Structure formats: C-alpha cells, structure tokens
Image (cartoon, grey):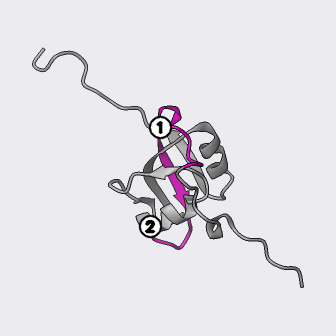
Amino acid sequence: MKPRKKSAQAQEPLSDQQKPPEQARRHYLIQVERPGEKLSIRDVQKILATTGVEVDDQYGPILVNPDLGRHAVRGWADDESRQRAERIHGVRFFADPRIAPLGAPGA
C-alpha cells in the first residue's frame, strides 16, 4: 500500500519571514467550495494556512450557495500566495476593489 501524500491542509503555516511584504499584497474576495460543509473562519484559515494568504477574520465566511458549499471571505495576497492558494481544489480569487463615494457629500 502506498503512503498517502500530505494534503495542503496538513502542512505548517508560513512563518513571518516567509510572508511577502505588505506593499505587494492586494485585497481579494476569496471563494472556497466545500460541498456539504459549513465552514468557520478558522476552517478557511486552515485551508489557506500554507499559502501565505491572509484572511480577514472580521468578514465571513459568508455561505453564498449552500447547495455547492460555496463560501466567501475577504483576504490579502501577493501573486505567489494567490497562485499557491488557487492550486487548492475549490479555491478561487476575485478582485475586491475599495469603493469610495464620488464627489463631495451633498453635491
């Protein structure tokens, strides 16, 4: 019988020295699909722990499609961290631009 490969979830989180500088990181909405599961923020953090992606623990996860087990969270990542995370089955990234009002208030 072959030994089982470690899943991405079983690896150690990145240390502070391994994390990229803040200025290279961008905001994203991150979709995580786990059919049949209702994820907590800790579950999402464990799924993404080895990638370098930082999850905003003040937002989500929001269950946006219960039938598909589709959850949404906010987070930050640089390009390499995003690429590592997108290799995990069921994880996708979407732009999360900051929206500000146009013009002065009352104009």
- Amino acid under disc 2: Arg
- Amino acid under disc 1: Glu
Q: Position of residue 22 (x, y in %)?
A: 47, 37
- Rendered residue at 10%/19% (across/down): 106
Q: Position of residue 10 (x, y in %)?
A: 64, 70
The picture quadrant where one finds residue 9 is bottom right
Q: Which mark is residue 22?
A: 1
Placement of 103 over or under 73, stated as above or below: above
Placement of 64 over or under 24, stated as above or below: below
Quadrant for the C terminus, please: top left
Q: Are marks 2 and 1 in contact (CB under 8 Å)?
A: no
Q: Is residue 72 magenta?
A: no
Placement of 1 over or under 65, stated as above or below: below
Q: Which mark is residue 42?
A: 2
Query: Which range of residues does the magenta coloring cover?
Result: 17-38
Q: Circle 1: is it few (<14), some (14-19), or many (20+) Cα within 10 Å?
A: few
Q: CA distance from mark 2 to mark 1?
A: 22 Å
In the image, taking residue 37 as reference, residue 84 lies left or right, namely: right
**Can see residue 22?**
yes
Between 20 and 57, the one lying in front of the other is 20
**Can see residue 69?**
no
Which badge, 2 or 1, comes first in the chain's sequence? 1
